Amino acid sequence: MIPILAMLLQAAAPAPAAKPADPREARYDRCVTLARDDPAAARAEAVRWAASGGAWFARQCAGLAYTQEQNFAGAAGEFEAAAKAAELAHDRRAAIYWAQAGNARLAANDAPRARTALDSALVAGTLEGLALGEAQLDHARVMVASGDDAAARRDIDLALTNAGDDPLAWLLSATLARRDGDIPRARKDIGEALKRAADDASVQLEAGNIAALARDEAGARAAWAEAARLAPNAPAGRNARAALAQFGDKPATVPAGR
């Protein structure tokens, strides 16, 4: 699955604007590159820059640096600060920053604050294309966490229109369909996820779950075995091995050092 940082960086590019490019964008690009390679140095650069007029550019760069360090709460705070500053300046980038804040709040397991940020991103009406689809996908994840599957389905169907190349969108759609008992849709959507990310243990695990519900024992065993092989120490791999145990299958051996 696309790492969180990669998802955030997809939306990091400045939004198109009719007016000339902001001269701060070149420094911003350098800061984003630094955030990938040396997040501590990028945060220090962002602090210096914020003190000398870096505004939302500096705060977003700091958020990306925190994300690289997996400090998602810290990242969310920076993205929210960037969004508020951009809103005050009537800059279209504000919606992107709110979407990034929502993604970071989800990574920090803070669904209520993720929803607030994502609502702000979507209500702005300025997101387009992949950025819009990813925000809709994250909003669907918030709805799942809140137990509102009907709202999640509405969000995910919108996300599939705008971010249909993201295997996570198809995986979530398949999982929702399975939970609703819609096996034909679940099988169709997990098939789309497999086309895009057959090497993802979470996708294989769900493929096994759906096959099992459809009484396809061979398909379930094959998918679960693949999930266990791909990620033996990750939750998806462990869950797959537990599922295989019902058949008396020997759990996949965990290679040394993994």
Image (cartoon, rainbow, N blue to C red):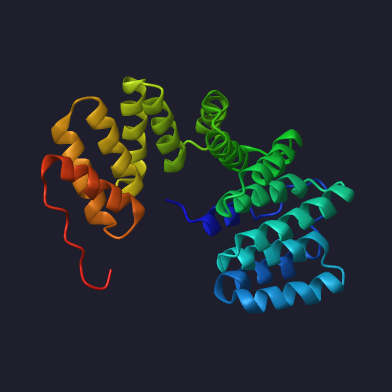
Residues 231 and 198: in front is 231
Name the spot of residue 190 as percent of width and height, x first: 34, 34
Residue lying at 81% horizontally and 45% vertically, measured from the top left: 18
Task: Kindly indicate the quadrant of the structure image that contains residue 28.
Answer: bottom right
Q: Position of residue 82 (x, y in %)?
A: 77, 56
- What's the residue at 68%, 46% (across, down)? 113
Instruction: Say whether residue 115 is left or right of residue 158.
Output: right
Q: Is residue 224 left or right of residue 140?
A: left
Rendered residue at 16%/53% (across/down): 251
Percent coordinates x, y for residue 225 in the rendering: 19, 47
State left or right for residue 228 relative to residue 86. Answer: left
For the question of whether residue 49 can be seen, the reply is: yes
Residue in the foreground of this view, choosing between 185 and 107: 107
Q: Nearer the viewer, residue 10 or 43?
A: 43
- Total numbered circles: 0
- Residue 249 in the image: above or below residue 12: above
From this viewpoint, is residue 200 visible? no
Question: For residue 92, which quarter of the picture?
Answer: top right
Return the residue nearer the eye: 245 or 7: 245
For the point 16% across and 40% down, the residue is 246
**Image quadrant where one finds the C terminus:** bottom left
